[in-house]
Structure formats: C-alpha cells, structure tokens
Amino acid sequence: MHDGVAAYVLGVLDEEEHEAFERHLDTCEQCQAELIELAELPDQLDELKNTPAATSGEDPPMSMSR
C-alpha cells in the first residue's frame, strides 16, 4: 500500500502534498484501487468514535467487517 493513499483519504496531506498525490493518482492504477478500498474509512472511523463502546472505555471489537 502506498502511504499517500491513507493520508489522502484521511485528509492529512498539506496542499502541496495533496496536489502531488492527485497527479500521481492520475497514472497509478494500484493507488486508484487502494483509494476505492479506503474511501469509506473516514466514515467508518467516525462511526466507531461515536459508538457507546468507544466512549464508555470498553475494548473495541477485535475485528471489523468490510
């Protein structure tokens, strides 16, 4: 996995890195495929953050379904 894909999806790249990664993404089929796989990650993380288990101090589930 290209490190930039996860950073791009999570929105942690600065403007220059973001633009550079988008140029890279135009020609890299592997990163395009990884982007599709990770596209829902921010929403899934938000859901986990807002679940009662996440706020009650309970241990998170051992596995997550895709």
Image (cartoon, grey):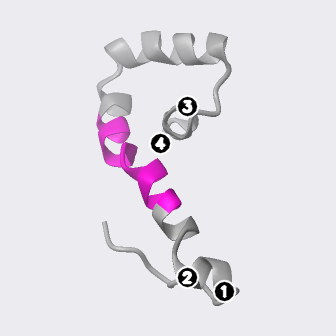
Asked if the magenta segment contains residue 34, the reply would be yes
Q: Amino acid at mark 4?
A: Met
Q: Amino acid at mark 2?
A: Pro
Magenta stretch in the rendered image: 33-46
Q: Position of residue 48 (x, y in %)?
A: 51, 69
Distance from Cα at disc 4 to Cα at disc 3: 9 Å
Q: Which mark is residue 52?
A: 2
State which quadrant residue 18 falls in.
top right
Which residue position holds label 3?
A: 4
Q: Secondary structure at mark 1?
A: helix
- Mark in front: 4 vs 3: 3
Q: Main secondary structure of the magenta part?
A: helix
Q: Secondary structure at mark 4?
A: loop
Distance from Cα at disc 3 to Cα at disc 1: 33 Å
Question: Callout 1: 10 Å neighbours few (<14), some, many (20+)?
Answer: few
Which residue position holds label 1?
A: 56
Q: Classify 48 as above or below 56.
A: above
Asked if the magenta segment contains residue 42, the reply would be yes
Which residue position holds label 4?
A: 1
Lower sequence index among marks 3 and 1:
3
Mark 1 and mark 4 in contact? Answer it, CB < 8 Å.
Answer: no
